[in-house]
Image (cartoon, helix red, strand yellow):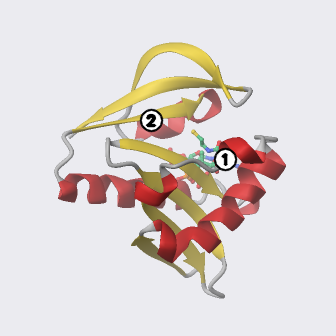
């Protein structure tokens, strides 16, 4: 599959990132829509991957404080490396900006995915938006 990846701000990528996040978090995972959008979107760096038809297929964001979040890949395209591609793009961007440490709240089913990319578990499992999570950290 041919793909391209774009990194930018919320004004640039809002429409495509929102489409994917509604599909994955609100519809698939039943996260209440009012929890899906927050004030962090406007100040984050966003990444969206597109297929050859220009359809958004994967996304994620990096907050100014070093939090990575809202990682989502279209369901029928998971396991093909797109999540890794988005995560690596955000890691590269974070390093370019000068972050020395990153963190995220991983859904527990995705712990192995983040561990394979160098994140470490940090703390106890907790519930967020009705889904089990664990804090993870990454050191450059
Ligand atoms: C977590 C998520 C972003 C990962 O994206 P992805 O594109 O599936 O990730 P990748 O393909 O890069 O890596 C998934 C790993 O699982 C393996 N895998 C195999 N089949 C898979 C499948 N059907 N679904 C997911 N992963 C699969 C892959 O081989 C890969 O292993 P590797 O890291 O050793 O290479 C994606 O599953 C997703 O959007 N989930 C729903 C939303 C979500 O839970 N987001 C995370 C919030 S913390």
* SS label for mark 2: strand
Residue named by callout 1: 36
Q: Residue at x 76, y 48 (%)?
A: 33
Instruction: Note whether ligand 1 is within 8 Å of mark 2.
Output: yes
In the picture, measured across the screen, residue 100 lies left or right of residue 111, that is: left
Asked which quadrant contains residue 75, the reply is: bottom right
Residue nearer the viewer, 65 or 27: 65
Tell me which label, 1 or 2, sits earlier in the chain.
Answer: 1
Mark 1 vs mark 2: in front? 1
Whether residue 44 is visible to the viewer of this picture, yes or no, is no
Q: Residue at x 16, y 51 (%)?
A: 98
Residue 122: x percent and y percent? 40, 18
Q: Residue at x 49, y 76 (%)?
A: 12
Q: Is residue 45 above or below residue 16?
A: above
Residue 127: x percent and y percent? 65, 20
Residue 113: x percent and y percent? 51, 40
Residue named by callout 2: 104
Q: Residue at x 46, y 65 (%)?
A: 47
Q: Are marks 1 and 2 in contact (CB under 8 Å)?
A: no
Instruction: Note whether ligand 1 is within 8 Å of mark 1.
Output: no
* SS label for mark 1: helix
In the picture, measured across the screen, residue 33 lies left or right of residue 14, that is: right
Asked which quadrant contains residue 129, the reply is: top right
Label 1 and label 2: CA atoms lie apart by: 16 Å
Q: Which quadrant would the C terminus be assigned to in this image?
A: top left
Residue nearer the viewer, 25 or 41: 41
Residue nearer the viewer, 37 or 50: 37
Q: Residues within 10 Å of mark 1 (few under 14, many from 20)?
A: some
């Amino acid at each position: 599959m041919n793909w391209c990846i774009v990194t930018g701000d919320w004004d640039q990528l809002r429409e495509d990132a929102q489409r994917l996040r509604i599909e994955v978090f609100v519809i698939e995972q039943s996260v209440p829509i009012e929890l899906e959008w927050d004030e962090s979107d406007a100040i984050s760096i966003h990444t969206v991957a597109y297929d050859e038809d220009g359809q958004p297929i994967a996304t994620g964001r990096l907050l100014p404080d070093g939090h990575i979040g809202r990682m989502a890949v279209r369901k029928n395209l998971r396991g093909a490396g797109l999540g890794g591609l988005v995560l690596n793009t955000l890691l590269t961007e974070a390093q370019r900006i000068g972050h020395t440490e990153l963190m995220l709240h991983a859904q527990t089913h995705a712990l192995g995915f983040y561990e394979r990319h160098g994140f470490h578990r940090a703390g106890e499992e907790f519930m967020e938006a009705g889904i089990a999570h664990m804090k993870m950290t990454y050191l450059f």
